[in-house]
Each structure stands twice: as C-alpha cells, then as structure tokens.
Image: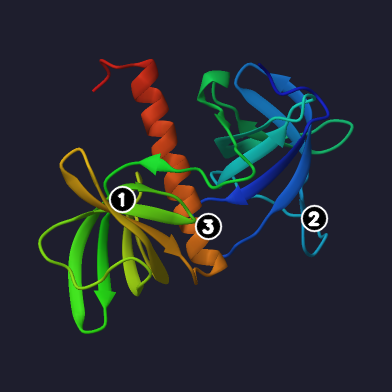
Amino acid sequence: MEIKIGTQLQLEPTYTEHVEKFRCKVVEQQDNIIYIDYPTNVVTKKTAFLIDGSEFRATFRTEDKHSFAFNTEVIGRKAGNIPMIMLHCPKAEEFIKIQRREYVRVETPVDVAVQFKDYKYQLVTVDISAGGLALILKGNLAFKDGDDVKLTIVLPFANGEVNYVTTDASVVRIFEKDNLTIATIQLTDTDDVDQQHIVRFCFERQLVNRRKELNPFEV
C-alpha cells in the first residue's frame, strides 16, 4: 500500500501540550519521502510554516474508506510550481489501522496511582486506551464496582519524556482472570490535552509492538 498523490493528510504534533491539527495534500512521493503543500490549521484556517525536525502523527483515508496513521518528521523543503514540505514516510507495514469507533487499546504495563476516599494504591495496568484501562489488583482494596476514583497515570515515552495524566474515573467491573484480580476502569473527566497524551502513548506502544512482531529477534 502506498499513499497516493492527492491524498489528504491530517497532522497532529506529537511533542507539545497544545492540541493542534493541520490539513495538507500529498503533491509528490519518492522512496521514503512524501511532499506536501503548505498545511493549514484546521481551526484558524491559517497557513502553518512547519519547522524542520518537527514530529507529527499523520492520518489519512484510503479510497476504500479505511483510516491509517504513521509517525513522521519534517525533513526539508522543495521549490516547484508550488512550495512543498518534505516529510519522512515509513514503510507501509508500519502504518497503523485506526478503528474510528473506539479508542485503540494497547496491552502494556503502566504505573497508575489510584485514590479512593482516603486510600491510595500503586497499581499497574494490563492494557490502556484513551477511554479506559484495566488494572491488576493486589491485596485488599477499599473500592468496588461502581465507585468513583481519581487516577494519576504515568506515561513514559520513547524519547525519555514522561507525562502524568490526572483524571477522574469510575470502576466498571472487578473480576478474576488467569489467577489475577482485574479491575476495568472508565476515564470520566479527561481533558483534551491529557487525552491526546494517552492517544499518542498508545500509538507509540502499538508501533513498538508491531515492530516486535515483524522482527521478533531484534534487540
């Protein structure tokens, strides 16, 4: 699969607290480089001048209406009939298919602090998405199905950056699985910035898992 000329891309900065979205079109493609016209800010409609080295999450739709995403970086500019920006394009097998009706859920351990009334617990996830997570429970805990809790989620990114997401949540269900006690938690009051941090973290971990599947012996 390749990104065809004329495909519309949506770009979202990956390393910023500001939630911004830009739209652009693919003008040319060569090897692992795609050339786009100057993007416009989705909200302000103003032209954006992207800085070399800026990193983005790019999403696009194919002719058969499937949506995909990939990580990219601004690597330069090119003069032509129209001024163009050069973006790095990974191999097609590294594209992630997006399930639009639900958040991507990734199996990965993440440290989470749970506060319920005056009780505090340090737990670890089984999986996580921007809509909720599953926690491994240990010992006797005060909360039960239906209780409201406050979470602090630690998100370590590949570049060494660590984000702390604090959000209200609700305990959906506590159950036993594979000799473990699991609690599924729904996030109920996550702001847009924190939600984008979780989406970015899940996307990054999904790429790592995909690479491990493709190269199981890679260190």
Mark 3 to mark 2 CA distance (whole Å): 23 Å
| Residue 112: quarter of image | bottom left
Asked if one can make out residue 77 in the rendered structure from this viewpoint, the answer is no
Numbered disc in front, either 3 or 2: 3
Please give the label number shown on residue 47.
Answer: 2
Query: Looking at the picture, which amino acid does disc 1 mark?
Result: Gly
- Secondary structure under tag 2 reads loop
According to the picture, the residue beneath numbered tag 3 turns out to be 196
Going from N to C along the chain, the mark reached first, 2 or 1, is 2
Point out the image quarter for the N terminus: top right
- N-terminal-most mark, 3 or 2: 2
| Residue occupying the point 77% across, 57% down | 42
Front residue of 10 and 202: 202
Marks 3/1: CA–CA distance: 18 Å
Furthest residue toward right: 81
Q: Nearer the viewer, residue 197 or 49?
A: 197
* Secondary structure under the numbered disc 1 in the rendered image: loop
Q: Position of residue 168 (x, y in %)?
A: 41, 73
Q: Label for residue 129?
A: none
Classed neighbour count for the residue bearing mark 2: other residues with Cα under 10 Å, few (<14), some (14–19), many (≥20): some
Closer to the chain start, of discs 3 and 1, is: 1
Left or right: 133 in relation to 175: right
Q: Which amino acid type is marked by label 2?
A: Thr
